[in-house]
Amino acid sequence: MELISLLVLAIVQGLTEFLPVSSSGHLVLMQHVLDTREGDVFFDVVLHLGTLGSVLAVYRREVRRLLRLDA
């Protein structure tokens, strides 16, 4: 699978994980659009890094505050 396809799918995963619709459904749709067929566990884990990235982006200030040792 191309890196671009993987990045697109990770972004879709990150954006749709917290919506009241199926992020898995969006991934299946995007895999069809991008003509990719990956289904192994490693692939799913890599896609969920998009979710982690979106959470860290939204809560970056809180995460920094929690990780500060002097506060």
Image: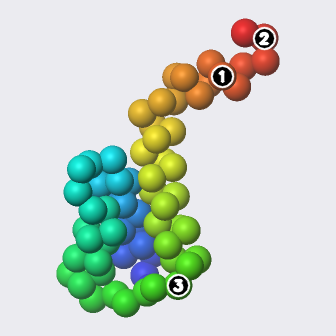
Asked which secondary structure carries label 1, the reply is: helix
Q: Nearer the viewer, residue 29 or 60?
A: 29
- Residue type marked 3: Asp
Which residue is located at x 78 percent, y 18 percent? 69
x and y percent of residue 71 in the render?
72, 9
Q: Earlier in the sequence, mark 2 or mark 3?
A: 3
Question: In whole angstroms, how far apart are the C-alphas of marks 3 and 1?
Answer: 34 Å
Q: Earlier in the sequence, mark 3 or mark 1?
A: 3
With respect to residue 16, does 70 lie above or below? above
Can I make out residue 15 in this image?
no
Q: Please, which residue is most extreme toward the right here?
A: 69
Task: Locate the N terminus and report the quarter of the image it occupies.
Answer: bottom left
Q: Secondary structure at mark 2?
A: loop
Residue 18 screen position, x and y as percent: 33, 47
Residue at 78%, 11% in the rendered image: 70
The amino acid type found where label 1 is placed reads Leu
Give the quarter of the image for residue 68. top right
**Residue at horizontal 24%, vertical 84%?**
32
Asked if residue 13 shows in the view, the reply is: yes
Tell whether label 1 touches label 3 (CB within 8 Å).
no
x and y, in percent, of residue 59 in the image: 48, 30
Instruction: Name the residue carrying label 1.
Output: 66
* Horizontal arrangement in the rendering, residue 7 relative to residue 65 (left or right): left
From the image, tell me which residue sits under label 3: 40
Neighbourhood count class around disc 3 (C-alpha, 10 Å): few under 14, some 14–19, many 20 upward = few
Identify residue type, mark 2.
Asp
User: Is residue 19 rendered to the left or right of residue 9?
Assistant: left
In the rendered image of this protein, does residue 17 appear above or below residue 64? below
Q: Secondary structure at mark 3?
A: loop
Q: Which mark is residue 70?
A: 2
